[in-house]
Image (cartoon, rainbow, N blue to C red):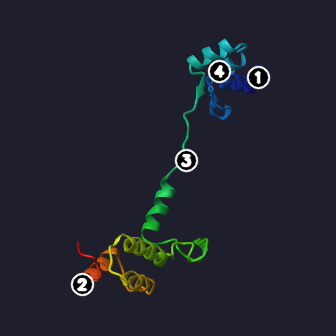
Amino acid sequence: MELNQVKRVAAEVMGVGETRVRIRDGVKSAQAMTRDDVRSLIAQNSIVILPLVGVSRSRARHIRGQKGKGLRKGQGSRHGSKKARGGLEWPQRVRALRDELAKLKLKKGARRKLYMMIKGGYFKSREHIKRYSQEKSLLISK
């Protein structure tokens, strides 16, 4: 059998790709006629199956280290608008504050006032709106 055929048969027998098969002894391998002959050559190490080769992570680790330092953020590395890249802090804060406002038990007329203050950017956090409503005695006492 020709060597390329021996290589193909060995790959089929071992369940690997042909590129992982190496023939060490070409003379013995050329005399192989059956699959059993190929199996015996594999057992004798005349035909060797190479181990799997993975993709090196060293470049990826290097890039991650650079990004951790704040590098690789230039114009050429950017995709999307400024807002699409995480520039939407205000809407998220307003949603959280309005959610907190809905949970509070307030006196009449206070809800609209606080709602407009949230819209105006007066409050910075949930804790801030709670503290303000207590100081101004806008909460309904039980």
Residue at image location 61% in from the left, 72% down from the top: 80
The reply to whether dot 4 and dot 3 touch (C-beta < 8 Å) is no
Q: Nearer the viewer, residue 31 or 95?
A: 95
Is the residue marked by circle 2 packed among few (<14), some (14-19), or many (20+) residues within 10 Å? few
The image shows residue 87 at horizontal and vertical percentages of 51, 76
The image shows residue 112 at horizontal and vertical percentages of 42, 83
Which circle's residue, 4 or 2, is located before the other in the chain?
A: 4
Residue at image location 62% in from the left, 16% down from the top: 39
Q: Nearer the viewer, residue 81 or 47?
A: 81
Please name the amino acid that badge 2 sits on. Glu
Eye-nearest disc, 4 or 2: 2
The span from disc 1 to disc 4 (Cα, nearest Å) is 16 Å
Check disc 2 and report the residue beneath it. Answer: 135
Q: Which mark is residue 55?
A: 3
Q: Quadrant of the N terminus?
A: top right
The span from disc 4 to disc 2 (Cα, nearest Å) is 81 Å
Please name the amino acid that badge 1 sits on. Glu
Which circle's residue, 3 or 1, is located before the other in the chain?
A: 1
Which secondary structure, mark 4? helix
Check disc 1 and report the residue beneath it. Answer: 2
The reply to whether dot 1 and dot 2 touch (C-beta < 8 Å) is no
